[in-house]
Amino acid sequence: MTANAKARAVGINHVALEVGDIDEALEFYGQFLAFELRGKHDTMAFIDLGDQFIALQKGRKQSFDDGRHFGLVVDDKEAVRHVLEKMGIKMLSERFIDFHDPWGNRIEIVGYEGIQFTKAENVLKGMGLDRLGKTEKAINELTGKGMDPR
């Protein structure tokens, strides 16, 4: 690379969330997400997302997030909506599944089928999710970028 070259962003390896207590956070997220732990320590836990992960770190001190959030991709967002409603979690938007966890992290739940984000076939297979497909809209968006997923 030359001195003036810029690196190209290719994805996100992980998202780190600060929480009050690791075990409580794992219990909270485990109510609406099926996941495996990549690892756990006294002050950190790592929720496996195949080739990515969520890092939970003990020690949140700041107030609740407003616009700052992350979109968590799931295979069944309506299942998440149903569980969150049963849990009494307040939605922050009528249009999206958008909420705060107990520590103030703002999370939006996004369905895999309707977005441009894709996992490689080998990663989906390894996660037991090789049945996931895409909507025509998502396929057209990807195809328009030269990334036809079919």
Image (cartoon, helix red, strand yellow):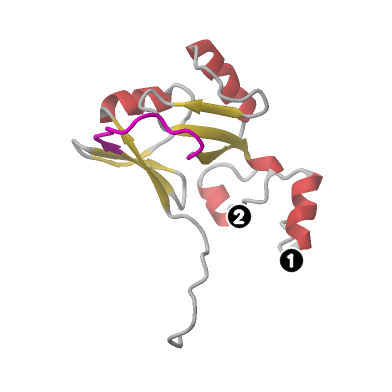
Which numbered dot is residue 48? none
Going by the image, does 132 lie left or right of 5? right
Magenta: main secondary structure equals: loop
Quadrant in the picture for residue 113: top right
Q: Is residue 64 magenta?
A: yes
Assess whether mark 2 and mark 1 are in contact (beta carbons under 8 angstroms): no
Alpha carbon separation for disc pair 1 and 2 = 17 Å
Mark positioned earlier in the residue sequence (1 or 2): 2
Which numbered dot is residue 121? 2
Location of the C terminus by quadrant is bottom right
Instruction: Mark 1 vs mark 2: give the one in front.
Output: 1
Going by the image, does 3 lie left or right of 25? right
Residue appearing at x 52%, y 39% in the figure: 72
**Can residue 150 be seen at all in this image of the molecule?**
no
Going by the numbered disc 1, the residue's amino acid type is: Gly
Q: Position of residue 114 (x, y in %)?
A: 71, 41
Residue appearing at x 46%, y 44% in the figure: 49
How would you rate the neighbour count of disc 1 (Cα within 10 Å): few for under 14, some for 14-19, many for 20 or more? few
Describe the element under mark 1 as helix, strand or loop: loop
Residue placed under numbered mark 1 in the picture: 146
Quadrant in the picture for residue 131: top right
Q: Position of residue 123 (x, y in %)?
A: 53, 53
Residue appearing at x 47%, y 84% in the figure: 4
Q: Position of residue 124 (x, y in %)?
A: 57, 48
Residue lying at the far bottom in this picture: please name it.
2
Of 150 and 147, the residue lying toward us: 147
Going by the numbered disc 2, the residue's amino acid type is: Glu
The range drawn in magenta is 57-68
**Can residue 101 be seen at all in this image of the molecule?**
yes
